[in-house]
Image (tube, coloured by chain):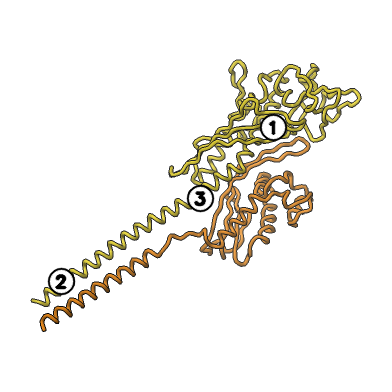
Chain colours: A yellow, B orange
Amino acid sequence: MKNTKKAIFFSIVSVLLIVLFVAMTQLVTKFKLEETKIETTRTKIKILNSLVKDMEDNYFEKIVYVVSKNAIMGLSNYYYANDYETIDKPLDIAMADVMQDGILVDSYSVGHDLTSSPEHIEYRYTVEGIIEKLDNIYSKLGLEINELTLNITPGNVEQIDPWTIRVEADIVYDFIDKEKIVSWKGLATRTVDISVIGVRAFDMPNSPAKAHNGRIIKENWIVDQDPYTEPSIYGKLSSRYPVSPDPTNGICTPEFDRNGGTCDVDTE
Amino acid sequence: MRRKKITNKAYIFMMDGMFAIVVLVIGLLIIMSTKPYATNEIQVSMVSENVVGLLSQVKIIDLCDGCKCTNAKLKELCQNSEIKNNESTLLGYFGELYSFGDKNHMITDLFSNLSNDLYRKDLYGSEIKIQNITLYSDSGIGTSRNLISRKKMVFGYYEQGNGIVEFWGPYNVEVNTWEK
């Protein structure tokens, strides 16, 4: 009887020890799982952080360049196709219009889609087009784009030399990871110098023939000389009416007649 | 005599209890000592960082003075007028070549050539994919236990003196590095 009691007592103690051990093991395993989960999330955030940093350090500037150049080239093509009669607002305002989605709003508030046929602006290199592509790439990496807008403050586009237009743009961004744990919000300002090569330009704004001369600017164009006849490319793309010559920023076609001092060349 | 017997039993129970506690503590220590596996401290991580760092930060102009390049393959490409924008990073240049559609072999050759100077091919391997297309891959990716994958996005443009302006991308680039 005594031995049986002892055996039952030992059994109970053993079972209690086993239960205790199992419970503690379960607890530790749960703790470990949580720790692994945290470590995985930490690694994931690290990767996304580097993606966003990469975007801020390298790609915002490229986005501003590509979108701005696409807009300037597209506007010059559109103006050329319409005999330059559609120039309705200064270049910086027109750029701000078309950069987002390719739609130019005229002074009657009518929108002209420059991305539709005939395509003057490549839609995939407008802000909306780039967002679509980025969204596609980033969603595979676990990042969602809530907002990405590019704003040009009027007056922040200027011709700095005959070959270059400087654009300053603000980028507002809001990215969030797919699990909605971390988000990245911010405002970045980027300044880019855009080459006018590839842009169409009419040569002689004071001449009635201007509308027919929309040659594409190439490397072999030459800087206007005294007596000056040419406005800057910024000036030309900002008004359908004659603009005063810009003594420091005008460029002429290669056939520039140095003796006659005119840039007027009407044929390609 | 009976009192001594009880004392002995108490000692045995106490020792038994202590032994059980020691076993439990050792067991718990063993379980707790297993840390989540993190690869960022190991060498392959540094190799991966080197490869991606070189590709995404070094510009062609840093490696070439005109067409005098420190890398033979880059020199060859430059002499064949295959470099349109020397301000581009190497990764950007890969993206530009990829945009042509028929120049992927140039990416393969150039990456193969560059990687020879970046890591020991007998110890490590690497692979580059653009838009999920494998353009270069060393052997051993299937058998490696340590692999680090890094992803980047590239896009850009090139302009030529004759007025041609082309935009390309964005493309996703994946660089995998592993220990053999």
Vertical relation: B107 (above or below) B167: below
Q: Amino acid at mark 1?
A: Arg
Pick whichever, B2 or A193, lies toward us. Answer: B2
Q: Residues within 10 Å of mark 3 (few under 14, many from 20)?
A: few
Q: Choose the circle earlier in sequence order: 3 or 2.
A: 2
Task: Classify residue A216 as left or right of residue A156.
Answer: right
Q: Choose the circle earlier in sequence order: 1 or 2.
A: 2
Task: Classify residue A248 as left or right of residue B38.
Answer: right
Q: Residues within 10 Å of mark 1 (few under 14, many from 20)?
A: some
Vertical relation: B115 (above or below) B97: below
Residue A116 in sight in this render = no
Task: Classify residue A110 as left or right of residue B5.
Answer: right
Contact? badges 1 and 2 (CB < 8 Å): no
Q: Quadrant of the N terminus of chain A?
A: bottom left
Judging by the rendered image, the residue that carries numbered circle 3 is A46
Q: Quadrant of the C terminus of chain A?
A: top right
